[in-house]
Amino acid sequence: MSLRSRRESSKSSSRVGKPGFKRPNSTQRTKKHSSQNRRKTASNKPRVAPEDRKVIIFNKPYDTLSQFTDGEGRKTLADYIAVKDVYAAGRLDRDSEGLMVLTNDGILQAKLTQPSSKSPKTYWVQVDGAPTEADLDKLRKGVELKDGMTLPAQVEIMSEPQVWDRNPPVRFRANIPTTWLAITIIEGRNRQVRRMTANIGFPTLRLIRYSMGDITLDELQPGEWKEIKLSN
């Protein structure tokens, strides 16, 4: 037996022999791990009484972070929203615009963001070029991204929406058309919609989130927010 093996054997034997030490079996370890996970999940998703629930909808402007703090001096939610103890249900990229939902209800947060809840999120997406129905069928069936296949999406060509001008404006090229799409997904991967349209050869120029579940952007202009009441 090598010196290292003898030392490990001696260490293991002395530890097991100490009074009060009991090696947990696999079942005990699993139960402990599950219990810890349940406590962690519960603490991350506080349930609040309906009368105490706060729900805020916000139209996030372009070039704003979907968080309240930043160490680099960039615009954040704190530049617009002064309400305390509310947290964003999901993120929206800095270069994307539109609906954000903020709440103090962790259960609602999970319902809006976790794929298992199958809560739809609809985006109005301006893409470079003119995709055909055959191109869009690829998104409807799911495309292979670096982090795996996407779930089937609902995709429709739409008329240009009557929305605010973006600052800075989207680049314009007279010889290349652009197309607006309404894309609905139930996932929420990082920059997912942008990666999906790039995958089929039509890069996203502008992205506006219009709805999350049954909550819509309503008439809010960039930087505006309001508190709403939900029926359940």
Image (cartoon, helix red, strand yellow):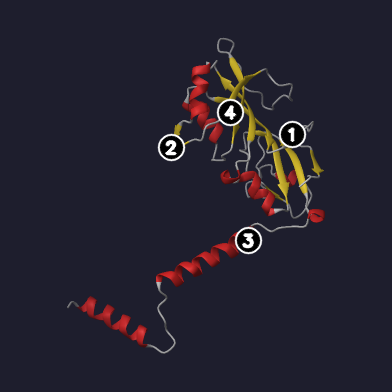
- Mark 3 or 2, closer to the camera: 3
The residue under label 1 is 217
Secondary structure category for the residue under label 3: helix
Secondary structure category for the residue under label 4: strand
The reply, left or right, for residue 124 in relation to residue 55 is left
Amino acid of disc 2: Lys
The residue under label 4 is 154
Residue drawn 71% across the image and 58% down it:
47
Position in image of residue 190 (x %, y %): 54, 40
Amino acid of disc 3: Ala
Position in image of residue 77 (x %, y %): 71, 44
The residue under label 3 is 42
Residue drawn 73% across the image and 24% down it:
163
Q: Residues within 10 Å of mark 2 (few under 14, many from 20)?
A: few
Task: Tell me which numbered mark, 4 or 2, is placed earlier along the sequence.
Answer: 2
Whole-Å distance between the Cαs marked 3 and 4? 33 Å
Amino acid of disc 1: Leu
Task: Tell me which numbered mark, 3 or 2, is placed earlier along the sequence.
Answer: 3
> Is residue 142 shown to the viewer in this render?
yes
- Mark 4 or 2, closer to the camera: 4
Residue 146 disc label: 2
